[in-house]
C-alpha cells in the first residue's frame, strides 16, 4: 500500500474533527423518572458519576506522601507535585474516574501583585470526557477553583502568596483528602495486615463487645504503608490543672473519653487552694470541676453519686451534676471532702441521641 499523501493526511485530520458529530452518544430517557443502567444500553458520563458517587472523591494513599508539594524554587517560581516515595506513583479518584501521576510534575506559582491563594487541584472536566488522556488533570488556580461546566476538584494544596514574597517563604497548606474503604470483621485477629490497605481504612470489629472501630494508621505516612490498626475513640483526654482545681497527686488525672456513643469519666480533682469542698459555694451552683466539650455533654442533666478523700473518719459523699452545657458540678452536704473521684461515671452524649 502506498504511503498517504499530504492531501490524505489533511483529510484524516478533518475526518477526526467530524467524528464527534457522527458518533452516537448515549442520551438519558425523557420523562420525570427513570432508572439505570439498562442491560445492553450505554450510559452517559453523568450517569456513571452518579453510580460511583457513593465511592467519594479523594487521594488513594498507599503511603510515601503521594501528591506532595516539594521543591519550591525562588528562581523559577515553580514547585513540584511529587509521586509517592514508596509506591513511585500517585493515585486519586473523582466521580468514578481515576487519575495516576507516574512522575513528579512541575507547576508554576508566579509572583502576585496582591494577596493571592493558589489552589493546587486535581480537576475533573466533563468537557474532556472523551480525551484519550482522561478527564482529570493537575491544575493550579489563582483563587477559588471554577465549578462552571460541571468541573469537580480535589484540592491538594493551598499556597497563599503576598506581593514581593519569595516562593520558598510561603506557608503551603496541605489538604489532600484521602478516600478509603470500610471493612467489617468478627474479631480483631481477623483484620488484614494494615500494610496491605489504604491509609485511613476503617474497620469495625463486631463480635467483641463493645463493638469497636479502628483505622489503618502509622507513625509516618512518609515511610510507607500503614503500620497498625489504631483504635477510634477510647482515648482519654486529660483535663489540665486550672487556678481553681488541680490533680491531687494520686490516682488518675481527671479525664474523659468517648466510646460507642457514651462518655466515660475518671480521675481525681481537688481544690487548688487546698481547702475542702463545702456546701455553700457559688450561690449554690456547685463546684464546676470539669467542663466537657458541648457535643460530649448529655442531652439533659444527669446526676451521679461520688466519693473521695476526707480528713475525718466519716466517708464523704457528693453529687455530680453533668449538665447539657457540658459543665460537671460537684455538690456536697458537708465540708470534709478534700478531693473527689470521678471513676465509674458514664452516660450517653447528646450526639449519640440525635
Image (cartoon, helix red, strand yellow):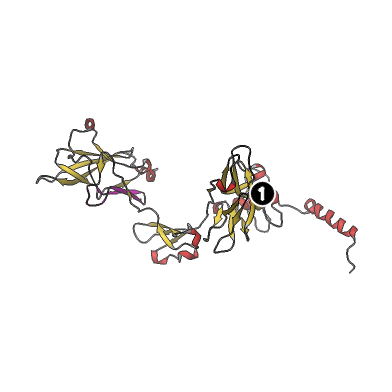
Q: Position of residue 235 (x, y in %)?
A: 35, 53
Whether residue 182 appears in this view of the structure is no
- On screen, residue 87 versus residue 317, left or right, reads right
Residue assigned mark 1: 125
Whether residue 208 appears in this view of the structure is yes
Asked if residue 51 is positioned above or below residue 316 in the image, the reply reads below
Residue 261 included in the magenta stretch of the image: yes
Residue extending farthest to the bottom is 1
Q: Position of residue 16 (x, y in %)?
A: 81, 55
Q: Position of residue 236 (x, y in %)?
A: 33, 51
**Observer-nearest of 45 and 146:** 146
Q: Secondary structure under badge 1?
A: loop
Q: Position of residue 226 (x, y in %)?
A: 47, 62
The residue positioned 25% from the left and 39% from the top of the image is 244
* Rendered image quadrant of residue 81: bottom right
Asked if residue 224 is positioned above or below residue 135 in the image, the reply reads below
Q: How many numbered marks are there?
A: 1
**Observer-nearest of 168 and 312:** 168
Q: Where the C terminus falls, by quadrant?
A: top left
The residue positioned 42% from the left and 61% from the top of the image is 229
- On screen, residue 328 versus residue 218, left or right, reads left
Residue extending farthest to the left is 313
Q: Which residues are magenta?
A: 248-268
The residue positioned 55% from the left and 62% from the top of the image is 85
Residue 333 included in the magenta stretch of the image: no
Q: Where the N terminus falls, by quadrant?
A: bottom right
Residue extending farthest to the top is 283
**Observer-nearest of 207 and 346:** 346
Amino acid at each position: 500500500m502506498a504511503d498517504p499523501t499530504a492531501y490524505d493526511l489533511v483529510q484524516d485530520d478533518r475526518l477526526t474533527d467530524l467524528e464527534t458529530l457522527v458518533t452516537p452518544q448515549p442520551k438519558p430517557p425523557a420523562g420525570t423518572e427513570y432508572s439505570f443502567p439498562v442491560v445492553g444500553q450505554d450510559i452517559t458520563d453523568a450517569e456513571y458519576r452518579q453510580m460511583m458517587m457513593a465511592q467519594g472523591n479523594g487521594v488513594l494513599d498507599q503511603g510515601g506522601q503521594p501528591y506532595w508539594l516539594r521543591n519550591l524554587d525562588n528562581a523559577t517560581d515553580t514547585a513540584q507535585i511529587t509521586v509517592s516515595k514508596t509506591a513511585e506513583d500517585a493515585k486519586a479518584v473523582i466521580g468514578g474516574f481515576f487519575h495516576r501521576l507516574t512522575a513528579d510534575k512541575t507547576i508554576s506559582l508566579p509572583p502576585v501583585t496582591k494577596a493571592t491563594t493558589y489552589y493546587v487541584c486535581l480537576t475533573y472536566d466533563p468537557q474532556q470526557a472523551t480525551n484519550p488522556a482522561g478527564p482529570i488533570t493537575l491544575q493550579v488556580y489563582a483563587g477559588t477553583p471554577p465549578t462552571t461546566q460541571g468541573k469537580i476538584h480535589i484540592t491538594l494544596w493551598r499556597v497563599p502568596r503576598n506581593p514581593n514574597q519569595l516562593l520558598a517563604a510561603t506557608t503551603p497548606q496541605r489538604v489532600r483528602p484521602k478516600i478509603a474503604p470500610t471493612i467489617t470483621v468478627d474479631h480483631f485477629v481477623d483484620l488484614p495486615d494494615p500494610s496491605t490497605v489504604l491509609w485511613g481504612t476503617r474497620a469495625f470489629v463486631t463480635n467483641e463487645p463493645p463493638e469497636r472501630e479502628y483505622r489503618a494508621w502509622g507513625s509516618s505516612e512518609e515511610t510507607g504503608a500503614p503500620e497498625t490498626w489504631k483504635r477510634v475513640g477510647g482515648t482519654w483526654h486529660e483535663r489540665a490543672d486550672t487556678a481553681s482545681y488541680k490533680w491531687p497527686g494520686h490516682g488518675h488525672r481527671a479525664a474523659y473519653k468517648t466510646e460507642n456513643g457514651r462518655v466515660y469519666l475518671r480521675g481525681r480533682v481537688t481544690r487548688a487552694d487546698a481547702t475542702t469542698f463545702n456546701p455553700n459555694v457559688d450561690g449554690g451552683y456547685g463546684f464546676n470541676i470539669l467542663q466537657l466539650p458541648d457535643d460530649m455533654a448529655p442531652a439533659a442533666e444527669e446526676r451521679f453519686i461520688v466519693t473521695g478523700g476526707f480528713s475525718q473518719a466519716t466517708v464523704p459523699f457528693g453529687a455530680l451534676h453533668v449538665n447539657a452545657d457540658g459543665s460537671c458540678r460537684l455538690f456536697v452536704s458537708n465540708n470534709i471532702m478534700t478531693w473527689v473521684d470521678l471513676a465509674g461515671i458514664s452516660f450517653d452524649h447528646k450526639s449519640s441521641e440525635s
